[in-house]
Image: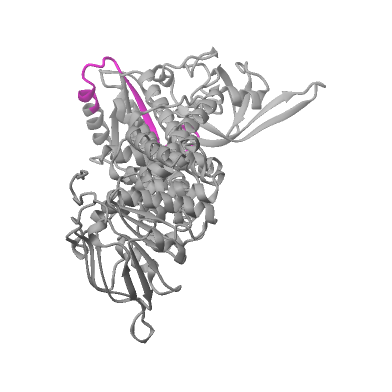
Amino acid sequence: MVANNSVIIDLKKICKRYGYGDAAIFALRDFDLQVKQGEFIMIMGPSGCGKTTLLNVIGLLDKSSDGTYTLAGHPVERISARKKAKFRSKKIGIIFQDFNLIPTMNILDNVALPLVYAGFTKVRREKQADEVLSRFHLQPKEYYMPAQLSGGQKQRVAIARSLVSDPEIILADEPTGNLDSRSAHIVMEELKAIHEEGNTIIMVTHNPSLTTYATRVINMLDGQIDTDIKTVADKDLPEPVSIHFGKKKEKE
Amino acid sequence: MALLFRTHYNLARESISKNRTRSFLTCLGIAIGVASIILILSLMGSIRNLVDGQVKAAGSDLIVVRPSSIKNTVESVVEQLTSSGQYRNSNLSLKDVSSIAALPEVAAAAPIVQINATLTANRVNDNGENYTSTVESAPVVATSADFAKVQNLVLSSGSFLEKHYNDNIAVVGRSLSLSLFGTTEPVAKTFSLFGEKFIVVGALPEADDPINFNNIDFDNSVFVNAEFLVKKGENIQVQQINVKAKNTDKMDELAGKIREEVIANKAGDTNFSVLYGDDISHPANGLFMIVSGMLTLVAGISLVVGGIGIMNIMLVSVAERTHEIGIRKSVGATSGNILLQFLFESFILSGLGGLFGLVLGYTLAFFISIVTPFAPYIDLSILGMTLATSFTIGLVFGIYPALKAAKKNPIESLRHSR
């Protein structure tokens, strides 16, 4: 463990407004957050407090109405839509509560999907997807369709898909929300292992018992941070993978 | 880029093969449009070839004089088609025929005057009773013995209007002979025309060219001497003069001489045409060009309808796959990637429809050629143009659904129920 963790996500005065004038609703209001490499952040809070919106803004799926967002030193406001898509395919892995697998594609193709847009050949895509699936013990089910898998297996496939392009940041929106406790435990153990490899994970959850996996727990209320508790000191965070957005990444 | 194109192609192919019935029906819309166009253009090309072939068969020594000047424009053909009784206003006369025939370079010159008249003949039925057989509005072609020489006509029996002790002689076509006399051997039989009795001196074999540059229905016509109509006091207006040259070396020179002769006869009136070579078939070809243009336009409408079918099915596909679009965008697809994916799909649908239509069109043309004299006419430019049109249809009608898919918000798409 080394204390070499720099800020990878820097949100300053972020606002996300829906509607205009008197009808305006703020999902995020003057939201400030700094995320260091190697952190495992658990975001909690009541429904409608802006957790998913925050994740969408961080994942470049949504734009903030106000404020500045700097991702690995790049001001997001200046990044083109094309570049944002490239970041999503190579640098950010997103895990959803309802898995979001394409039902008409088999497991291997679903996992390899981000590599399609990263410009990999079919052979390389399948090889890399096969490798990541074997890590999750899902290799025998590569040619199954999503409907043939259990909820836990689907979520593990979704995690495999988020990891296939070897991203530095993993965003998980209630990944255990639709799973039974046993499957949830397996999924959390997988995420813990990924975190220990040096990846940064930001996860939204309603389940307080899962906070034991986190290095930092943020409670949100009405689009703002209510409480922000670090359970692990910065110096004890895992050695991070090096972040070179736009350049080839190497393990330090 | 090439890799991404290949990926989009594969994605589109997969998507099409997953919805086989729907894709087939969509392709069918385009295929029917393309098949109609191919069929029409093939038939028209075949007819054009047929007429050109007849002119060539008639010989390179053929010169045709037609009333009114003919320009190689669509407008002139339309004018010819729309001016009623164009031949009745012909400024050519039998005098022109005789002055052309007098030229030393001319081997033969024959006028063509077409009118319709009622023919009657006395026949005996199976019971030995006499009755009158009548053919209403039979085409009567008034010409001269030279017509056979110019046309290289071969008769099934008898001779063609050769000078005879009797001026009232006729040659009949095969179908007319059957309906008037009940036989294909009409020589020496008699019939009445304009109250005068005619004797049949020759019979034509079955014609295999229902469409020809003379505009004569050989099977159903009766040929008589043009002098007969003069004798009857009819106002003779020659619709065409067919001229056979003695040699083919100086056709342009001869055409010039014929032109001078006719102008001299008409005191400077130049409103007529002297044609030879490919120009002879031009009016017929011009007519077919217009007809084929009109029919192609109608078939083109069905192609547009097929295009609307593609747009409709692509819009359905985009609506059905909104969630998938959200997933793809969340894992790194750009709007351009999504646009290309859907555009490829409509492109492949229309391309497949085009190919299918091409095969269907030529198959139909082949079957039609079995029962008609029109052999399928395959032209690379038609093939290329039709395929290009179907691909363009795919592009034009696929762009709106593809843009709609590309513009979808990833978050809203992910929320879209599957």
Instruction: Name the residue nearer the viewer: A44 or A14.
Output: A44
Instruction: Name the residue nearer the viewer: B352 or A228.
Output: A228
Instruction: Name the residue nearer the viewer: B400 or A128.
Output: A128
Left or right position of B112 against A60: right
Number of numbered discs on residues: 0
Q: Is residue B49 above or below residue B404?
A: above
- Which quadrant would the N terminus of chain B be assigned to in this image? top left
Display coloring? one colour
Residue found at the very far bottom of the displayed protein: A22
The magenta-colored residue range is: B229-255
Q: Is residue A157 above or below residue B43?
A: below
Left or right position of B391 against B188: left
Instruction: Name the residue nearer the viewer: B144 or B10.
Output: B10
- Residue drawn at (20%, 24%) of the image: B253
Residue found at the very far right of the displayed protein: B127
Percent x, y of residue B182: 68, 22
Check residue B403 for magenta coloring.
no
Work out whether residue A142 can be spotted. yes
Percent x, y of residue A3: 19, 56
Percent x, y of residue B98: 33, 26
Left or right position of B9 against B229: left
Work out whether residue B70 can be spotted. no
Check residue B243 for magenta coloring.
yes
- Residue drawn at (62%, 15%) of the image: B185
Residue found at the very far top of the displayed protein: B157
Residue A212, by quadrant, is: bottom left
Percent x, y of residue B170: 54, 23
